[in-house]
Amino acid sequence: MAIMITDECINCGACEPECPNTAIYEGGVEWTWGGGTSLKEVTLPDGTVVDANEKQEPVSDEFYYIVTEKCTECNGFHEEPQCAAVCPVDCCVDDPEHRESEDELLAKKAFLHAE
């Protein structure tokens, strides 16, 4: 599963630099598929192809957020999600809406980093 940041976030920013996929963004900040990855373009589930550097709408305007499609729970990089390890208020938690197996997370890592 992916990790999510709850509304208990204090916006300290400790999590953001720890993410190997650049899946964590400050509230209100647009995100890109390409940031922190090897992607040049992405085919979305509806078949639309987007430039990986095209800015996407923020997931949250209030607090730090994690882009689920880029979160691998640090599989292939670390033994545990680094955002959760450094969060001082324990608001980086498993996202019950996005369950993925270790194999799926490793496949996502391979996709993001052209492995």
Image: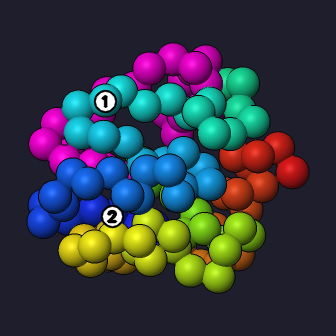
28 left or right of 38? left
Residue displayed at 62% across by 30% down:
34
SS at mark 1?
loop
Q: Which of the marked residues, 1 or 2, is nearer the chain's N terminus?
A: 2
Q: Nearer the viewer, mark 1 or mark 2?
A: 1
Based on the picture, tell me whether residue 54 belongs to the magenta stretch. Answer: yes
Q: Position of residue 110 (x, y in %)?
A: 78, 55
Q: Which residues are magenta?
A: 42-66
User: In this orientation, which residue lies closer to the viewer: 13 or 74?
Assistant: 13
What numbered label is drawn on residue 4? Answer: 2
Q: Position of residue 94 (x, y in %)?
A: 36, 76
Residue wearing tag 1: 29
Q: In the displayed image of the protein, which residue is found farthest to the right? A: 115
For label 1, count other residues whose C-alpha is less than 10 Å away and answer few (under 14), some (14-19) or many (20+).
Answer: some
Q: Is residue 115 toward the left or the right of residue 108 in the image?
A: right
Q: Secondary structure at mark 2?
A: strand
Task: For the residues labelled 1 and 2, say whether their Cβ atoms are less than 8 Å apart.
Answer: no
Pinpoint residue 18: horizontal percent, then vertical percent: 53, 58
Q: Amino acid at mark 1?
A: Val
Foreground pick, 64 / 50: 64
Using the rendered view, name the quadrant where residue 105 is placed: bottom right
